[in-house]
Image (spheres, grey):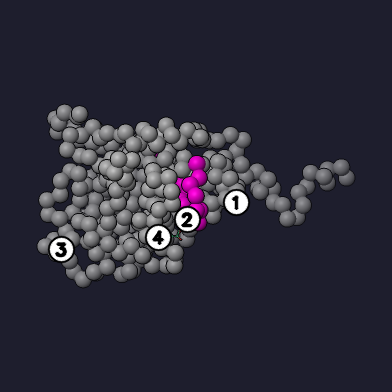
């Protein structure tokens, strides 16, 4: 029978033959790293009293929060750094205190964005409580705040800040989700994320998702990071993230973090830069609205 030729062999499933879109469904300016990098280095917030776009990262332990901060730092330092220590042992959170990370510019000053890394949201008593993270949303946590001290805390305890300035308040909540374990996320962690999201919405805070570990979720991307927006698997995973947290697809960014590389990689950098550029602009919109509302004159 002539038709037999078109039947795939037993170890090749039809779906595997059709795992890629013909064209990128989101256009990426591959190779244009310098332009985006420079734009971010020169970025200025249109608010007279706020120097930094403060970005708060939340997510499960091991999702890649610290790795994302290191990856952003790598892009701007053009070498592999590890200031935000990552967890290579798996399981519970390695980061236990509230920390701000700044990115150094060429002249030693700080670039106009800052990251706050928190302890993971893993279930039960071991993770950071949504109560404490909701405090972080309003700028009420100081650097060094210890998430591990689970005993009943009061606002008088060290680590809490009573009069946060506008600059202390994060303006973007970044949910970090591991592409490889979305479907296995514990319900307790999802509930915590949703509680935090609700509080962030009430504060009119911008929210995005960074989806990490696309290299582990899709063999195509593992081989070639430029296939990130042609891989059907990655789009499916992004959609899953979007549905899980109710954040629209245009606020979901897949990023491969630096984890085993010893040298910078332009294509990885481009995805990181593009995600950061989106976050910074989405976050800065909040100040535009605020300053117009309060009558402040944007610079
Ligand atoms: N393959 C891969 N591994 C990653 C990626 N991002 C993070 N990791 C690894 O995942 C583990 C946990 O990352 P970490 O940043 O400590 O997670 P955190 O607990 O959310 O801060 C580390 O071993 C990282 O090297 C990624 O994009 N791809
Ligand atoms: Mg960490």
Task: Indicate which disc, 4 or 1, sits on the residue closer to the N terminus.
Answer: 4
- Whether tag 4 and tag 2 are in contact, CB under 8 A, the answer is yes
In this rendering, does residue 62 appear at all?
yes
Circle 4: element type: loop
User: Residue 281's spot in the image, x, y percent?
Assistant: 33, 36
Residue nearest the observer in this picture, 226 or 126: 226
Task: Mark 1 or mark 3: name the one nearer the start of the chain.
Answer: 3
CB contact under 8 Å: marks 1 and 3: no
Q: Which residue is mark 1?
A: 219
Q: Please say if 224 is above or below 288.
A: below
Question: Where 95 sits versus 263, above or below?
Answer: below
Point out the frontmost of discs 4 and 3: 4
Q: Residue at x 54, y 51 (%)?
A: 215
- Decide which of 54, 234 is in the foreground and name it: 54
Name the residue rendered at 33%, 52% in the picture: 57
Residue at the spot of label 3: 158
Magenta span covers which residues? 251-266
Secondary structure under tag 1 reads helix
Image position, residue 286 (x, y; %) = 26, 37
- Mark 4 C-beta to ligand 1 under 8 Å: yes
Residue 113 seen in this snapshot: no
Residue beneath label 2, please? 259
Choose the circle earlier in sequence order: 1 or 2.
Answer: 1
In the image, farthest residue toward the right = 1
């Amino acid at each position: 029978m002539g038709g037999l030729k078109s039947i795939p062999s037993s170890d090749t499933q039809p779906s595997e033959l059709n795992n890629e879109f013909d064209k990128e469904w989101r256009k990426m300016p591959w190779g244009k790293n310098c332009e985006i990098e420079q734009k971010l280095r020169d970025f200025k917030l249109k608010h007279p009293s706020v120097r930094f776009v403060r970005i708060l990262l939340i997510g499960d332990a091991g999702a890649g929060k610290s790795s994302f901060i290191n990856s952003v730092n790598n892009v701007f330092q053009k070498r592999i750094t590890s200031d935000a220590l990552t967890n290579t042992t798996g399981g519970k959170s390695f980061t236990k205190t509230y920390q701000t990370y700044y990115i150094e510019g060429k002249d030693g000053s700080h670039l106009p964005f800052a990251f706050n890394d928190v302890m993971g949201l893993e279930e039960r008593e071991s993770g950071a409580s949504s109560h404490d993270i909701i405090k972080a949303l309003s700028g009420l946590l100081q650097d060094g705040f210890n998430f591990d001290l689970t005993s009943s805390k009061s606002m008088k305890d060290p680590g809490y800040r009573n009069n946060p300035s506008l600059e202390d308040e994060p303006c973007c909540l970044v949910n970090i989700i591991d592409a490889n374990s979305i479907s296995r996320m514990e319900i307790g962690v999802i509930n915590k994320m949703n509680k935090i999201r609700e509080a962030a919405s009430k504060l009119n805070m911008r929210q995005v998702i960074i989806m990490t570990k696309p290299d582990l979720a899709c063999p195509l991307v593992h081989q070639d990071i430029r296939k990130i927006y042609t891989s059907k698997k990655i789009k499916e995973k992004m959609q899953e993230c979007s549905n899980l947290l109710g954040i629209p697809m245009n606020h979901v960014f897949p990023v491969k973090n630096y984890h085993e590389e010893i040298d910078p990689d332009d294509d990885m950098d481009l995805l990181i830069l593009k995600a950061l550029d989106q976050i910074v602009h989405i976050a800065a919109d909040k100040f535009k609205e605020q300053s117009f509302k309060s009558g402040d004159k944007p610079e």
